[in-house]
């Protein structure tokens, strides 16, 4: 199983996903600012994975806080929380993890500061291991929706790389494979950052799952031709009415799936469910650097030389760009939402006692 992040020898070891699949390179983060930078720059990405990174970032940040009691400690750790919360706005997982940590710290407020710091490291490791268990559970429930011989379309990367391991959208696929079902996956390339081409295709190939890469523009046509049996995607935030925010292009896939009578499923760990928001319209949508749209990032390599990373411009200099990283898919397009607690209709999410 691909592992994208771990706590090792008092540091955070992160697989630099911006270099995949050309280079498998790990980055050692020695302080919380580096973790925050890694989240912003997409060295690590995917809602659950950035939640885990934030938990580890807090543990790193806590180490340098000089305090002799709980109140001083909280005053010192607050900038760490704020920095991590400001990295990426759409996924709710960073807030989920910070709220969880705040609660833990409050419960243990009478403990000495050094033990609070130790607790934060243990908690970060727990967030990681729990996430893997949650994904396995999503896999178990979701596999029941997949039949022998099915072709599954996915968008972006909601696989092991986007989580502690095993993935959310990929979990039912892995589980169905382990049940002996012969399945295959179509991966949307996912412009502009190409998480489908660079990450999903790579990790499914590592798992030995037959995967076919298609351009984003092909998905509708593939559905019309009857080549897709179901769609499974991840989510960055699922709200009370069952609307979900996910990678830009998810909405188009969902509308096309409805039009073509293809079931559209969302794999959603409760860590990405936000019951404080009524509808998808209230979800903050991240807008990213126009350079992601006007340029390609890649590596040039010659035999015997180290790869050289750089940008290739593909659009006119100075062109106006909108680069919304996520979109909202209304619940009416979603057949069901697969969580670690079971499978729900979008309208049932509001009744879910999310593990908050
Ligand atoms: O911009 P990214 O790569 O962080 O976007 C990731 C996605 O949209 C994923 O589908 C989502 O975070 C779910 S990951 C299990």
Image: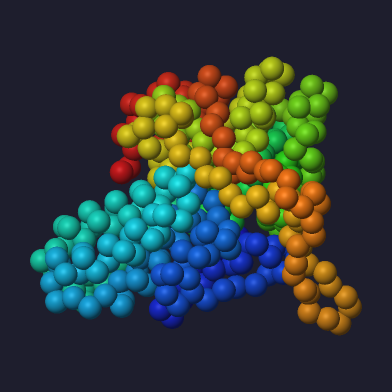
* Residue in front for this viewpoint, 197 or 137: 197
Residue 288 in the image, given as x and y percentages of width and height: 58, 49
* Residue in front for this viewpoint, 345 or 71: 71
* Residue in front for this viewpoint, 328 or 173: 328
Residue 290 in the image, given as x and y percentages of width and height: 65, 50
**Residue drawn 42% across the image and 21% down it:** 347
**Residue drawn 33% across the image and 26% down it:** 351
Residue 253 in the image, given as x and y percentages of width and height: 67, 30
Judged from this view, the residue extending furthest toward the left is: 110
Q: Is residue 326 left or right of residue 72?
A: right
Q: Is residue 343 left or right of residue 17?
A: left
Q: Is residue 101 left or right of residue 153?
A: left
Res 114 quadrant in image:
bottom left
**Residue drawn 79% across the image and 56% down it:** 313
Taking 198 as reference, is 261 above or below it? above
> Could you tell me which quadrant the C terminus lies in?
top left
Residue 192 shows in the view: yes
The tally of labels here is: 0
> Could you tell me which quadrant the N terminus lies in?
bottom right
Taking 277 as reference, is 63 above or below it? below
Q: Is residue 269 left or right of residue 324?
A: left
Residue 262 in the image, given as x and y percentages of width and height: 68, 23
**Residue drawn 74% across the image and 60% down it:** 297
Judged from this view, the residue extending furthest toward the front is: 318
Res 127 quadrant in image:
bottom left
Q: How is the image coloured?
A: rainbow
Taking 335 as reference, is 148 above or below it? below
Residue 349 shows in the view: no
């Amino acid at each position: 199983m691909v592992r994208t992040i771990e706590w090792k020898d008092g540091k955070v070891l992160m697989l630099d996903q911006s270099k995949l699949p050309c280079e498998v390179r790990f980055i050692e983060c020695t302080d919380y600012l580096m973790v925050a930078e890694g989240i912003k720059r997409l060295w690590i990405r995917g809602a659950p994975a950035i939640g885990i990174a934030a938990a580890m970032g807090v543990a790193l940040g806590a180490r340098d806080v000089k305090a002799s009691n709980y109140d001083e400690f909280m005053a010192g750790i607050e900038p760490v929380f704020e920095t991590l919360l400001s990295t990426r706005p759409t996924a709710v997982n960073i807030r989920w993890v910070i709220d969880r940590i705040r609660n833990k710290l409050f419960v243990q407020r009478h403990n000495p500061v050094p033990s609070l710091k130790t607790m934060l490291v243990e908690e970060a490791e727990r967030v990681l291991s729990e996430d893997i268990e949650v994904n396995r559970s999503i896999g178990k429930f979701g596999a029941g929706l997949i039949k022998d011989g099915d072709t599954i379309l996915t968008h972006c990367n909601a696989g092991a790389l986007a989580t502690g391991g095993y993935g959310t959208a990929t979990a039912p696929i892995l589980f169905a494979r382990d049940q002996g079902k012969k399945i295959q996956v179509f991966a949307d390339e996912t412009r502009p950052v190409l998480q489908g081409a660079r990450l999903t295709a790579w990790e499914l190939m590592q798992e030995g799952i037959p995967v076919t890469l298609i351009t984003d523009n092909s998905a509708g046509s593939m559905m019309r031709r009857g080549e897709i049996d179901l769609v499974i995607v991840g989510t960055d935030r699922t709200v009370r009415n069952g609307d979900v925010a996910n990678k830009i292009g998810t909405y188009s896939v969902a509308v096309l799936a409805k039009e073509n009578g293809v079931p559209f499923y969302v794999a959603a760990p409760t860590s990405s469910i936000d019951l404080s928001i009524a509808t998808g319209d209230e979800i903050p949508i991240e807008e990213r650097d126009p350079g992601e749209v006007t340029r390609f990032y890649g590596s040039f390599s010659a035999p015997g030389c180290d790869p050289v990373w750089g940008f290739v411009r593909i659009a006119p200099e100075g062109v106006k760009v909108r680069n919304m990283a996520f979109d909202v898919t209304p619940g009416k397009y979603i057949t069901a939402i697969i969580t670690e607690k079971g499978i729900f209709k979008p309208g049932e999410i509001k009744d879910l006692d999310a593990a908050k």
